[in-house]
Image (spheres, rainbow, N blue to C red):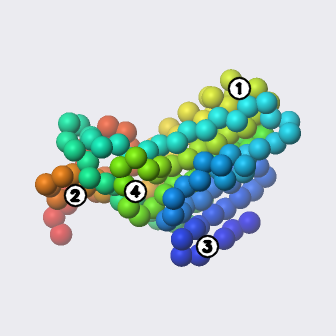
C-alpha cells in the first residue's frame, strides 16, 4: 500500500509500516500498527526535540527529506529487521517540518513474541534510520542562524554559503 497527500506519505508491506508526516505523531496509532495476538512484547521508541545541543540552546528543529527515497529506505530497513529478529510487526514514522522542543520527531514501534528481540530490533531500527534514511534537520539556536545537517547523532552541522 502506498499513500501520499500533502501531510502524510506512507508505505506498508507484510508487517512493516513506514511514514513521513507533517502533523504531531501519535504514540497510540503507531503501537496499534504493530499490535499482534502472537506478540508478547511491544517496544516503543520516541525521539523528542531537546532544548540544547553541544551546550547551545536549541530553539527548534526543522526536518526535510527526499520523501520517495526516504520511504523506500525506511521500508528496506523494516523488512530486514522483521526477518532478522522474527518480529510480528514494525512501524517507523518520522516527522517533517518544524518540531518544537519536547515534541516527537520520530516514533518506532516493534512487536515480537519475546521482549529481547523487540528491544534489540527497536534500537537497531533507530540506528539504521539515523545512518541510512534521507532525512536532514535544521537546528535553530537562540540568537544564531540555523544550521542544516544530516540527521546523525553528535555531528555538528556546517554552514553552507548560498
The span from disc 3 to disc 2 (Cα, nearest Å) is: 29 Å
Residue marked by disc 1: 115
Residue marked by disc 3: 4
The span from disc 1 to disc 3 (Cα, nearest Å) is: 33 Å
Give the mark count.
4
Q: What is the x, y in percent for residue 77?
A: 61, 46
Q: Which badge, 3 or 4, comes first in the chain's sequence?
A: 3
Q: Which badge, 1 or 3, comes first in the chain's sequence?
A: 3
Left or right for 113, reference 50: right
- The disc placed on residue 146 is 2
The span from disc 3 to disc 4 (Cα, nearest Å) is: 21 Å
Q: Which quadrant of the figure contains the C terminus?
A: bottom left
Q: Which badge, 1 or 4, comes first in the chain's sequence?
A: 4
Q: Farthest residue toward the right? A: 37
Name the foreground residue: 39 vs 147: 39
Please tell me in which quadrant of the rendered image residue 82 appears: top right
> Could you tell me which secondary element the residue under label 1 belongs to?
helix
Label 2 packing within 10 angstroms: few (<14), some (14-19), many (20+): many
> Could you tell me which secondary element the residue under label 4 belongs to?
strand
Left or right for 42, reference 70: right
Q: What is the x, y in percent for residue 130?
A: 46, 44
Amino acid at each position: 500500500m502506498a499513500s501520499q497527500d500533502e501531510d502524510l506519505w506512507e508505505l506498508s508491506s507484510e508487517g512493516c509500516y513506514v511514514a513521513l508526516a507533517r502533523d504531531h505523531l501519535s504514540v497510540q496509532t503507531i503501537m496499534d500498527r504493530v499490535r499482534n495476538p502472537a506478540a508478547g512484547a511491544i517496544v516503543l521508541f520516541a525521539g523528542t526535540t531537546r532544548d540544547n545541543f553541544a551546550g547551545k540552546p536549541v530553539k527548534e528543529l526543522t526536518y526535510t527529506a527526499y520523501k520517495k527515497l526516504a520511504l523506500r529506505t525506511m521500508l528496506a530497513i523494516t523488512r530486514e529487521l522483521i526477518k532478522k529478529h522474527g518480529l510480528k510487526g514494525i512501524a517507523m514514522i518520522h516527522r517533517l517540518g518544524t518540531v518544537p522542543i519536547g515534541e516527537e520527531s520520530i516514533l518506532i514501534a516493534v512487536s515480537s513474541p519475546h521482549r529481547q528481540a523487540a528491544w534489540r530490533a527497536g534500537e537497531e531500527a533507530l540506528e539504521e534510520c539515523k545512518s541510512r534514511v534521507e532525512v536532514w534537520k535544521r537546528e535553530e539556536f537562540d540568537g544564531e542562524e540555523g544550521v542544516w545537517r544530516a540527521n546523525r547523532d553528535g555531528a555538528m552541522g556546517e554552514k553552507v554559503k548560498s
